[in-house]
Image (cartoon, rainbow, N blue to C red):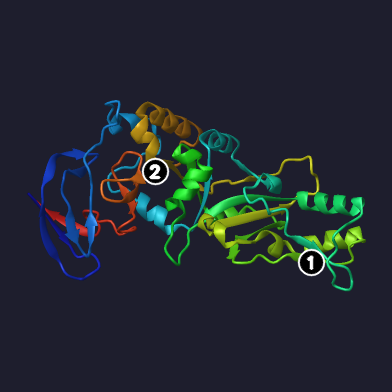
Amino acid sequence: MTRVISDYGSGKKELKSTKTDVSLYNGVPSYTCSMCHSGGFTFNASSIPKAKNGASVENVHKTSNASNTKYSNMRKDFKSINKLYHFTKFDTAIKILGSHNLRFGRLHDMNDIHENDKLSYVNLQGNTIQSFQSEILEVIDVEMAKFRQISLTIDDEEPKKFGFDLHQMWGLYADKGQGVCLVFDKDILCSKLDGIVRHGTVSYDKIVESFYIANHNDCQIIQHDMQNQVEKLFFHKRKEWEHEQEYRLIKYCPNLKKEEYLDYGDALKFIILNSVIESVDGIKFKEMVGKLSEYAPQVPILVYGNGLFDYSLIDINHTETIWTSSNGYDILIPGENCEIDV
């Protein structure tokens, strides 16, 4: 029996007994079928799981070059940075890692079918105009096409909704959990932006107001008005999209034929896979981990998914719990915020 002494949070020490496995996994006790209640929360640590094909997780994850060591600072590092997340398919993630760039996408490729449809036009008397000369319509379409964006996800502090814990994003943008969530340091990534890139959190409104343009026969005025209304055009969406917690980068790109990219430098800090892959196909999961480690050998790989009692974020070797849905980042760590008296 092992006695866990915790003085985390409440200021009081509490003794609880919990049955432990005699084995150590990477120097950390492997708890089996037990819970330690202390400080108002529950700490769960499972023994080394097996994939359905019989391969142990320990063998599956040895390809990772960014594996953590005993009592690493991975949880502290993850919690401390301001994060932006990019959900994408696995093959696209490999392209991003290989090129070290994020691509600015065209608005007509976005899921919101009204991204290009937020403009209303009035004459000098304020009356809505229903028809335009063809050359004016072409100017409007071309001008809208010059704006491109990179869509990211940000943590929502009120209420606490972390970007990596959004199931809709895993389903819609990360290939139904078969894809990847790239985690960037927001401060570093935004420092890479030049002066022409506008960036910020999208506002979700019950009603998205149209942007009114007057003097519709003057092409230069239309271009000028659109360029000066970027915030209203591209940083407001209807409330039904609020689950995305979107953070946008908007760039004006005069050359319609040229692709535009953002070199993220050293902003990529973590890569998250979903446990749905690991639980269904251990061999595929091992191959994915190996390929990610090949393209980003210094970036730690984490796993998000449904654990025994709640959702959790753990390191690839299953030796460190970063976050759980029940306790957040308040994880009991022997020697850090609790003691083990054997």
- Residue 203 visible, this orientation: yes
Give the amino acid type for the residue marked by disc 2 in the picture. Leu
| Marking on residue 302 | 2
* Residue occupying the far left of the picture: 1
Q: Where is residue 89 in the image (x, y as percent from the top left)?
A: 53, 37
Q: Where is residue 106 in the image (x, y as percent from the top left)?
A: 70, 46
- What amino acid type is highlighted by mark number 1? Tyr
Q: For this view, does 50 lie left or right of residue 237?
A: left
Q: In this view, does 215 lie to the left or right of 161?
A: right
Q: Which residue is at 92% across, 54% downward?
A: 133
- Quarter occupied by residue 215: bottom right
- Residue 181: percent from left, percent from top: 48, 44
Residue 284: numbered disc:
none
Q: In this view, does 179 lie above or below 117?
A: above
Above or below — where is 301 with respect to 159?
above
Instruction: Say whether residue 283 is left or right of residue 97.
Output: left
The residue under the point 79% across, 40% down is 257
Give whichever of discs 1 and 2 has the lower sequence position.
1
* Residue 302: % across, % down: 39, 43
The quadrant where residue 68 appears: top left
The residue positioned farthest toward the bottom in the image shown: 125
Q: Residues within 10 Å of mark 1 (few under 14, many from 20)?
A: some
Foreground mark, 1 or 2? 1
Res. 187 in view: no
Mark number for residue 212? Answer: 1
What residue sits 30% from the left and 31% below the top?
Answer: 51
Q: Which residue lies furthest to the front in this view?
A: 130
Give me the residue at 40% from left, 57% from top. Answer: 79
Q: What's the distance in space between the residues labelled 1 and 2, CA to CA?
A: 46 Å
